[in-house]
Amino acid sequence: MSSEERKPIIPFDFVAANCTLHTYYIIAPEAVAMPKAINFLFFLLICTALPATISAAGNRPVDVWNYYHFDGIAFTPGPAVDGSAFVAVRGKVQPVILTAQTAPIEQIALPDGAGVIAGICYLQSSGGKLGGGSGFKPYPRVPLLISTGGKELVTVQTDDHGYFVVVLPAGTYSVGSGPFTAEITVERGITTLVPLRAGKRMVD
């Protein structure tokens, strides 16, 4: 068959279905010397494959877990490499504190209109008069007061790794007490990571 005789008549654009396939064509029956039954079967095969491909694309996850670890100064992307705890974060889902990458991670959806504060309470163990570096010691089992507008809401306790997670309605909150208090804005569906320094270790 010459290129002049090949007549594409019905394009199926699979790109719009978020697939790796591109464009398929059905050849005009008069341009191919084959029985009508074979033409019909070919057409049926294409039409059957289309909804299956679109369905597979629609089931692909639109988001993934992102990992963050505390380096003594701030939260930085990636899991901890020294075996210490880190945070797995995903949009509209409660964050999870991990000590190793696991799959799958259990997903707990956030309530409508809520966000999350997740963080670590720590003692600075180096830097300044304590010497160079960004060393720190997690502060485990510490009660942290959560308040807003001068009203106490709830007290959460850090875990054995010094981490805490609290789900709250969108708004502005105070976390901690006394000189070690942080003002945090909570947004809907978002996890805000907070390093909360409880003090410095006394120099030996």
Image (cartoon, rainbow, N blue to C red):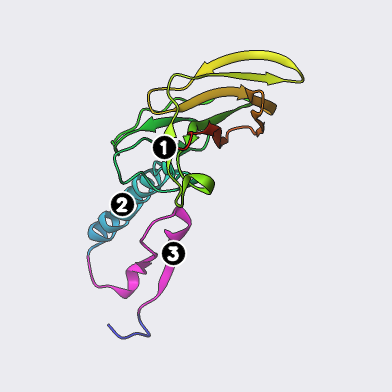
Q: Is residue 179 above or below residue 126?
A: above
Q: Secondary structure at mark 1?
A: strand
Q: Quadrant of residue 13?
A: bottom left
Q: Left or right: where does residue 126 sit relative to residue 115?
A: left
Q: Is residue 111 visible?
A: no
Residue at x 36%, y 60% (from the top left corner)? 20
Residue at x 39%, y 28% (from the top left corner)? 161
Q: Which residue is mark 2?
A: 44
Q: Does the magenta run of residues contain 7?
A: yes
Q: Which residue is mark 3?
A: 10
Looking at the picture, how far across and down is residue 157, in whole percent? 49, 18
Of the image marks 1 and 2, the number of the one nearer the N terminus: 2
Q: Amino acid at mark 1?
A: Ala
Q: Residue 179 bears which disc, if any? A: none
Q: Which residue is mark 1?
A: 88
Of the image marks 1 and 3, the number of the one nearer the N terminus: 3
Looking at the picture, how far across and down is residue 169, in whole percent? 65, 23
Looking at the picture, how far across and down is residue 80, in whole percent? 35, 44
